[in-house]
Image (cartoon, grey):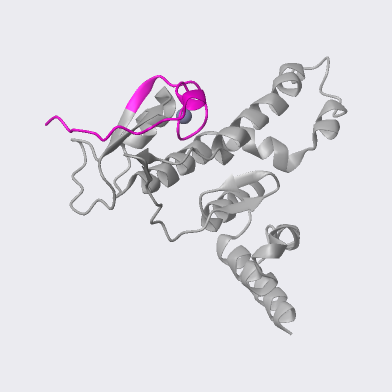
Amino acid sequence: MQQDYCLIETPFEYRNMCWFCGELKQFMFGFPHAQWLVLHCTHPPVEVPCCKECYIFALKAKVDSIWQVNIHVKQQLIRHYKKDLAIGLNWTKEELENSGFEGGNFEGFQRSAWLMYEIAKERVSYTGWALVVNGKELLCAEDKDIFEFDGLTYPTIDDAIQHYAQTFDLNTDFFKKVIAEFGDGRFGDAVRFCRLYVGSTPQERNTALNQLKR
Ligand SMILES: [Zn+2]
């Protein structure tokens, strides 16, 4: 089945960039497409320039709109680059430079790690340009809010929670409850608090939560 896509008026300066992550364009990704049937797409069929990696992720998204595809692609990028993204959670640039890895087996790691972190962070945080069809901007109908923390933009707060829980081995349920007590604006405090309870028993976590609530 050949899909007729609307002409998206891609601004000239973005014509060679991936709409999802800002890398160099290699393909055009159209949505909806023949491999995934969408009965109630909220926007006209559209096509955006796309890098190879995002294209592969995008094609597997079983969702209803190009904006949901974008969320899916970002989630896959976070998953795929979680080790690179964790660099910035564990070190600052200066700490890594002074980490004493030079001369040993990890010298290569020290050289490339910060760069890898910055590239991954920029790709995940990248916001594509407005999609314009026939002079009219398509409005994003997603109700989920993006979440920004420590220089990284996550598609949703749940993605940030999952990323930090995995990186620091936090108990996800406990972490969520602590955020509920602290509020989204104190995400960093919630991370620090929960890191005190890595390896704790359910009883210890319950006690901590009760103390927070008081
Ligand atoms: Zn991309």
Q: Is residue 148 above or below residue 202?
A: above
- On whether residue 15 falls in the magenta region, the answer is yes
State which quarter of the image contains the N terminus: top left
Looking at the image, the residue that sits furthest to the left is: 1
- On whether residue 45 falls in the magenta region, the answer is no
Looking at the image, the residue that sits furthest to the top is: 103
Whole-percent x, y for residue 54 in the image: 42, 31
Give the quadrant of residue 92. top right
Whole-percent x, y for residue 96 in the image: 81, 30
Task: State which region is magenta.
Answer: 1-28
Whole-percent x, y for residue 24 in the image: 49, 20
Say whether residue 120 is left or right of residue 193. left
Say whether residue 210 is left or right of residue 46. right
Say whether residue 128 is left or right of residue 27. right
Q: Nearer the viewer, residue 143 or 179?
A: 143
Query: For the stretch drawn in magenta, what is the main secondary structure?
Result: loop
- Tell me the residue at 71%/22% (across/down): 109
- Tell me the residue at 30%/32% (across/down): 7
